[in-house]
Structure formats: C-alpha cells, structure tokens
Image: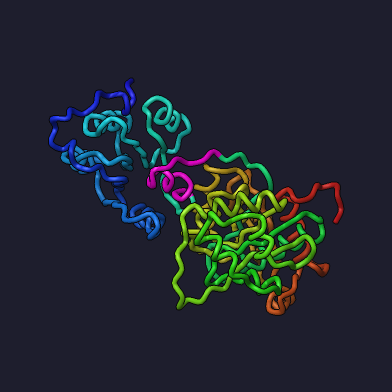
Amino acid sequence: MNKLSDRPSMSLKDPTSIVEREKFLGFVSDQNSLACIRTVLSHPAIGPMRVKLSSFEETLAALGAMRSPRTVLVDISGEDQPLSALMRLEQVIEPGTRVLVTGDVHSVAFYRTLTRNLGIREYLPKPLDPAQLARDLLPWATGDEPRVEAHRGGSLIAVRGLAGGVGASTVAANLAWLIGVETRRHTVLLDGDLLAGSAALAANVAPSSGLRSALETPDRIDPLLIERSAQAASDRLHVLAAEEPYTEKWSYHPGAGRALVEALRQRYNFIIADLPCRVFGFAAELLGLANQSVFVTDLSPRSVSAMQAVLTDDQARSAATHVAFIRRPHQRVSRASIENALPIGLGRALIDWDKSVRIASDLGSFASAKKGPFRTAMLDLVKSVGAIMETNPL
C-alpha cells in the first residue's frame, strides 16, 4: 500500500500549482469538534486558520478543486471502510501535504496502520478535547512538529475541576503543601488561570507579574525569571501565580507553556498546576504536558456522569489519572459506590469536605496541616501521585 506522500509531484503546467498553498485547512463533521478546534487555533499569534464543517464526500470535492494546503485535517467518522476512504483522499491531495485524521475508531492497531503504513502524521480519536489538540494538532497546524517528551526533571501534575466551585483549587493547594512542606520535595504551585485563579490567595502569598511576562515572551524564560517570580510559601513550596485585571489586554504566546514547564522541571521535583474547568490557551498546554492528571468533582449525579465521560477518553491516552471526589457533610456516599462508578486502573480519593476546610481556604491557610478526615484523604492522594513511598511516614 503506497503512502500518501509517495505519489508523483503535481505538474507545473497545472494552473492550480501557482496558487500559494494555505498553511492549514481542517474539515470536521460535527459541531463539537469544530468548536473545540477553533478554540485551540484562535490565538492571535498564530494567525487565521480555517476549519470547516464538512462530510467526508464534501471534503474530497473541496480538496479536488483547490491547491492542497500544507497541512490538512480530514474527518473519517462514520465511514464503513476508513482505510479505503483514505486511499480516495490520496487522489486529491498533493505530495508533501501533511495529513492529519480524526475519527471515531478507537484502536491502537488502526492508529499504527495509519501512521506507519499510510504516512498519516497524526490520528486524533473523538471526542476531541483542548488538551489533546494543543499537544497533537497545534504544532502541526503551525508548521512545526510535536516534540517527543523526555520527561526529564520534575513531574507536572494537573489538577482540574469539571465545574467551577467544586474545590479543585483547594485540592491543588493542599496537595502542593503536603508534598513541599511535609515530604520535603521542592514543589511549585502553578496557577493556570491568570485572570480568575486563586492559587496565590490559597497559599497567602502575593501574585506576580512575572508569570504574564513569561507567557507573553517565552524567550525570556530562564532560572532568574523563575526565581524572581515564584513567591515562597515555605522553604520548599513556591507559588507562581498572577491576578491580571480583566480590563487589560495581554497576548499569550502559543508554546510558552511548554517553555515554562521545561524550565520549572529543572528547578522543582513537583509542579502542581491548578487549572480552570474550561481549559484553553495556557491551561490547555499545561494539561497536555502533564505527567499525571487529578480530576476533582463533587458527588452530584450530573457531575459523576460528566466525570465518567471525561475519564473514558482520558484513560485511553494516559494511565496516570486520578479522581478526587468531594463529599459534603450532608452526603452519604460510600467508597464502594465510588469504586463501582469509575473505570478500573484509576487512582481514587474520597475527600470529606467539612466546615473547617472552607474556613481554612478563606483564611489562606492549609486545612491538611491539621489532623482529620480531610488530611487523611489528601495523604492518600499524595501517595497516589507518587510523592511519597507507602513505607515512608509523614
């Protein structure tokens, strides 16, 4: 079977060959994927990029009538014979075109066939999410290639709530405090939301303008900038956060998150990233770079259902996933019911959330510093993420 890039070159006599090739053009068949891709590609720094709502047949017709873009994304969802469909695509694109594919097939064998035998650069299984696209689509769309992560240095743990107000920021702050203060590992609490983030408030430290500066001009990121920008909550726990005004415009440079994380890995054993429930831009990059993810949710039926949907897709990409369920005082949910509600192979924590936790958060202190059910559950989460050995007492 020939690869898509092995066909003979287009003749110079073809009138379409003198037209400048578009950098990127995407075709997807559903509104959710369209909105997700447009969100990731909406940064002013990368310029306008077109993504269209189109069936596979309409995609073939459109590509056959135009000069092929340098990178094209096509959607094969719903095709009975997806490999045959891609061979038809071969007839309407130019050699050298970088082809990305999205679809509804979830199979490692299918992925390998596309990327190893057909020359497809990347296969993105649905449902798509911003973190996946920031990691696997954005570099191709901007003319680059995804970097192979060496995972050297510190470990990045992304903490994200599925809805606002479920307690993800409190979990992130207390996780960072236990790792940094009690296990004595060099730790930084990194706020992924420069406008509405609360990491600085949770740790009772001052926000810094250095984080914004790093994300606007990643070429300036160096150990000195990090040292000046990260505020000390203790000798081995620092906080890197900002509180930028909503009325002031600033420009996030795509790829700055990666540059920042690479620098932080060299300085800290653990990077705890507190992410907003809606991830895009900087937060999406952090989620895509994370070694481990901690999803935080309450125990309402709607939240549990949403969590199951997220985990089904996330588990297919990474086994380093943990779930923290917040149990309010009036709720009577057993650990056994939590175990049965989730896919196997995931770390779990059932965190009792009483009045003292809320008071500590309001005062900028750490509830896990005092003995009680909350501290016990957080220690279980610390062990789950590998920050302390089971036999090493705190």
Outermost residue, top side: 1
Instruction: Tell me what residue is drawn at x 82 percent, y 59 percent.
Output: 182
Q: Position of residue 28 (x, y in %)?
A: 31, 48
* 272, above or below 137, in the image: below
Quadrant in the rendering for residue 31: bottom left
- From the viewer's perspective, tell me whether residue 232 is left or right of residue 337: right
Residue drawn at point x = 72 percent, y = 57 percent = 187
Q: Position of residue 215 (x, y in %)?
A: 52, 60
Q: In the picture shown, does residue 27 fall above or below 307?
A: above
| Residue 141 seen | yes
Which quadrant, please, contains the N terminus? top left
Q: Which residue is drawn at the image coordinates 47% and 58% (left, top)?
A: 253
Residue 391, image x, y percentages: 85, 47
Occupied quadrant, residue 344: top right
Would you say residue 301 is visible in this rendering?
no
Q: Nearer the viewer, residue 209 or 382?
A: 209
Which span of residues is magenta-colored? Answer: 132-148
